[in-house]
Amino acid sequence: NSPNAYLNKQILERYKSLETPANRVQATYLWIDGTGENVRLKDRVLDFVPKSVSELPKWQYDGSSTYQAQGENSDTTLIPRAIYKDPFKPGKNDILVVCDTYGSNGKPTESNKRAALMEAMQTVEKEHEP
């Protein structure tokens, strides 16, 4: 029983109860990592309330730390695809941002299965247009 355990819980509760200003959003970007089994998260604060996914900025990170790239050329880009209200945070504007991942070459990472699905759906749609 660490004396800091109680202190840390008090501090956490204090910060959890802080209100987010009405014109700000805490956006939690989430994606599947290179193992295909784990969800990764990264938070950012936006100075506007997005009305659509197209308004959200892309975001880069080091893909070597998530098993999506080698040490060199490891820049990996998160591309937002869907927005949901975050049920785990108290702010009325807090959102979850589901993302696709693309490597430094601009191609989908191996764990980005949604890109292949979208390509297949677009092909089928073209073949079956009236």
Image: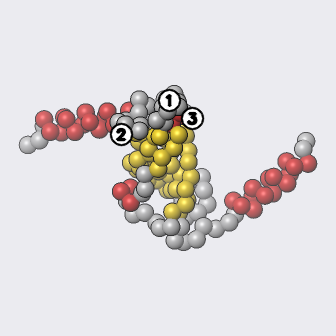
The residue lying toward the viewer, choosing from 22 and 62, is: 62
- Disc 2 crowd rating (10 Å Cα; few below 14, some 14-19, many 20+) is few
Quadrant into which the C terminus falls: top left
Q: Is residue 85 above or below residue 61?
A: below
The residue depicted at 78 percent of the width and 58 percent of the height is: 11
Residue 46 in the figure: left or right of residue 101: right
Q: Secondary structure at mark 2?
A: loop
User: Which one is earlier in the sequence, the residue at label 3 or at label 2?
Assistant: 3
Q: Is residue 86 visible?
A: no
Instruction: Give the residue pinned by disc 1.
Output: 70
Residue 65: mark in rendering: 3
Q: Secondary structure at mark 3?
A: helix
User: Which one is earlier in the sequence, the residue at label 3 or at label 1?
Assistant: 3
Q: Amino acid at mark 2?
A: Gly
**Whole-percent x and y of residue 67?**
52, 30
Colouring mode (rainbow / by chain / secondary structure / one colour): secondary structure
**Whole-percent x and y of residue 76?**
46, 40
